[in-house]
Structures are given as structure tokens and as C-alpha cells.
Amino acid sequence: STLGLMGVIASTTALFAPEEALASGGATAGKYTTIPIAKRRYYGRVQQAVHEYLEMGPAVIQGDMSAPIIQTFFDIEGVVVVPARNQAINGQCTKKDGICKGAEIRDSRWNDMKASMYLLGNAFRINQQKAPDNLPTVRAAKAFFKEIDAMEKLVKVKNPKKMDKDAIKRYAAGLDILDTYLDLVELPPIDSGHYEQEFDTLVGTSARIT
């Protein structure tokens, strides 16, 4: 849902220091400032999500939506989106209960994929005036979300179908749209072999493809 996506986005942006947020212009600054920052923040997460999306492809083609790899992709407890942080000050825990390790935030790989794809796509703007929904990157992302959100509704049910042709069609349609999106955000195509590896989802120090 849109509310869920906004929640993940809010959790994501809260990870960054105020000066970083200012430097990025709130993801609406000029092309040459925003894109490298967005790449460092979101390339790893987007690439890992694509890796897992493609990895479940063979199971999707088999049609059994109860397959663990498919269910895990949509499991809202499946991924640590924000790791637990040590809240001690200068090495000293000032909490009354003596527990300074914060709680981690978990969500599905799918929800994190939506958040990171949207935020990365939103950075590919030439000027501040252009609304996000008018950006080709965001339009491609939202078209992809529409297909896989529909697939999720078919998959996350009490008794997933053993042969769900509609879910297979949604997945296949998503592949074509995802390829368009990846090209727009300057990432390799899905058939390049690039996504056969795992990716570090932490904020990187480089805007290069990892």
C-alpha cells in the first residue's frame, strides 16, 4: 500500500545525518548533486532486491506460489531494513534499564525494493520543479509496483495456488518493466548476469555499480 511504502521511505531517510539530507536537497536538488548521493544510498538495496526477484523466477514459472523463496520475498519479517543501533553515548549506556541496543526494523524485500526504487528514481531529475510522477524513472517504478503488488495479493493468502497463471503473468510483465527502470537509473539489464551475486545493502561510499 502507499501508506506502507511511505513508512519504509520514512524509516530509510531517518538513517541519514541532517547534513546529508541537506546536501541531497531532500532528493530534489540539481542533477549533479542528487544522483551520486542517491546511488550511494540506494544502489545496493535496489540491486539486492533485483537479485532476489530474479532468483525466485524459476519457482514462479513452476506456478506453485507456496514455494518458500516466493513467500520469503513478500514476508514482512523477512529482511532487516534498519539494523539495531547502539544508543550508548561515548561508550556509556545512560538508559535506566541498562539496555542501549535499539530495536531493528524488519520488512519484506518487496517493500524495501519499492522504497529504494522510488527514492532512487526520484533523484533522476534535472530540476526541482518537475513533479516525481512526471519522471520517467518514477513512472517505470510505479508501473512495476502495480504488477508485483497484484502478484503479492495472489501470493500472500492462506492457501496459495499450486498453479497460479495470473501470478506468473504479473511476474513476467514485471520483468519487462524492471528492465526499463534499470536502464533509466543506469544499472545493468536483468539478462547481463550482473544480478547473480549478492549485494551489500548498506549505504556505500561510492556511486559506482558494485
Image (cartoon, rainbow, N blue to C red):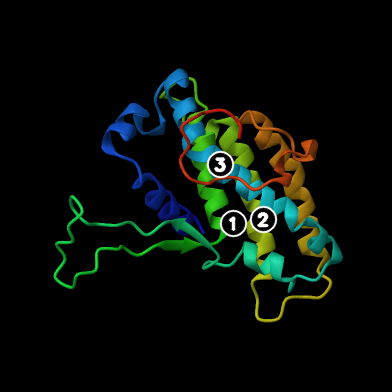
Inter-mark Cα distance, 3 to 1: 14 Å
For label 2, the residue is 148
Coordinates of residue 63 in the picture (x, y in percent)? 83, 67
Where, by quadrant of the figure, is residue 21 drawn? top left
Secondary structure under tag 1 reads: helix
Is 141 or 14 nearer to us in this picture?
Answer: 14
2 vs 1, front mark: 1
Which residue is at a point 72% across and 38% down the rendered structure image?
A: 194
Where does the image place residue 169, in percent across and percent down from the top left?
80, 57
Query: Which callout, 3 or 1, points at the residue further toward the start of the chain?
Result: 3
In this rendering, is residue 19 above or below 97? Answer: above
Task: Please report contact status of discs 2 and 1: CB closer than 8 Å, yes or no.
Answer: yes
Q: In the structure shown, which secondary structural element does the residue marked by tag 3 occupy? A: helix
Could you tell me how far apart the alpha carbons at marks 2 and 3 are, in whole angstroms?
20 Å
Please name the residue shown 70% across and 71% down the image. 68
Q: Position of residue 180 (x, y in %)?
A: 71, 35
Compare residues 45 and 205 and report the one nearer the observer.
205
Q: Nearer the viewer, mark 2 or mark 3?
A: 3
Say whether disc 2 or disc 3 marks the residue closer to the N-terminus.
3
Residue sitting at x 67%, y 54% = 52
Dot 2: element: helix
Q: Which of the numbered marks, if any, corresponds to residue 94?
A: none
Name which quarter of the figure residue 168 lies in: bottom right
